Image (cartoon, grey):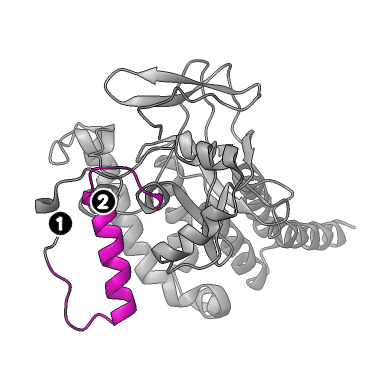
Amino acid sequence: MATVESIPVAPPNEYYEIRAIPGKGYGCFALKAIKRGTRILADDPLLVVPMANYMQRDIQEAFEKLSPEQKAQYFTLHSGHGQDARKWPSRIHESVAEQERQRIQEQHQARIGKEPTLISIFQINCMEMDQGAAVFPHAARFNHNCNPNACFTWNSAIGKETIHAMSDISSGEEVTISYCDMVHDKKLRSWELKHYGFVCDCRACGEDEDDESTFAYQSATRRFRLQELERETRFLRGSRLECGAREEGFVKKLLEMAALHQQEGDYTARLATVFLDMALVCEFNKDIRMAALTAAKAVQVKKDCQGADFAEYAKYAAVLARLNAKLAERKA
């Protein structure tokens, strides 16, 4: 997302450039064909706020630590100010604690204000970082799509925000990320994106969800089913995965989840986790061949969406190595 006062420029790289989009500001476009799994960007944080429930004073304190050049760079980023106050709730429920009430009021005033402020820029450009959030000046330039071709993640091992291609991207195609959860339905996505000050017109949002011939209908159907499957499997995964392994039909549900994520283009860490769970369940049930196959898929997706230098990648690779060793023992 870019400011109206400056023409943004991408950092030196071989993958993308920033171009103007008529009526929409700027976007990041592929300079050449980009393969799935390519790390398009590894970006250093510009401004860091080390807590999730930040206040205006926290942003101000972090801003004061920046150099004059960094402060100027911060104000080249898009701001979420100028929104219509009538489109937002007019009061805060009395049960909300005082500090949270102040935080909501600060963000609301920044949102409906007439000028860019530290908080109006921060709240629509920040990304999660450890226990807090940060603004990454180059990652912030990537536009949203509800079915993006790239994904972002904070890589604590290298101290950078990374963006990876989730699908093969053609030369000249815009590189997009999703600002909201890819499983959420249109109504919830619209509310989440409202905070950024725009209405999404991607295929999943712009087409008629009631028309079975449209992509929007197919996407909505997949997302609805994914939400159902997540509810059905929520308490049978993670630390309770062995309980899931004993439940009839559990693997079929994981297989369906994996298929739906892939059909939706969601090659994020969520898909990697589904494949890893499938591998561990198959291992528990002594199907080592299938366990190794699904573990290999988990490792590949994990590498593609976050990188082999991502801290959690080693855990995935270790599971695959263990299963391959078991498979080799059986063949010996």
Residue 162 in the image: state x and y as whole percent: 61, 43
Numbered disc 1: secondary structure: loop
Q: Amino acid at mark 2?
A: Arg
The residue closer to the viewer here, 17 or 7, is 7
User: Marks 1 and 2, how far apart in space?
Assistant: 10 Å
According to the picture, the residue beneath numbered tag 2 turns out to be 111
According to the picture, the residue beneath numbered tag 1 turns out to be 88
User: Magenta stretch: residue 100 in it?
Assistant: yes
Residue 147 showing in the rendered view: yes
Residue 185 showing in the rendered view: no
Magenta segment: 91-118
Query: Quick one: quadrant of the C terminus?
Result: bottom right
The residue closer to the viewer here, 185 or 53, is 53
The residue closer to the viewer here, 85 or 43, is 85
**Residue 263 left/right relative to 191:** right
Residue drawn where x is 67% and y is 57% of the image: 156
**Residue 58 left/right relative to 214:** right
Q: Counting other residues with Cα less than 10 Å from the Cα at mark 2, is it few (<14), some (14-19), or many (20 or more)? A: many
Q: Amino acid at mark 1?
A: Trp
Residue 323 in the image: state x and y as whole percent: 76, 61
Q: Counting other residues with Cα less than 10 Å from the Cα at mark 1, is it few (<14), some (14-19), or many (20 or more)? A: few
Q: Quick one: label 1 or label 2, which is nearer the N terminus?
A: 1
User: Magenta stretch: residue 175 in it?
Assistant: no
Can you tell which quarter of the image residue 70 is in?
top right
The relative height of residue 85 versus residue 141 in the rendered view (above or below) is below
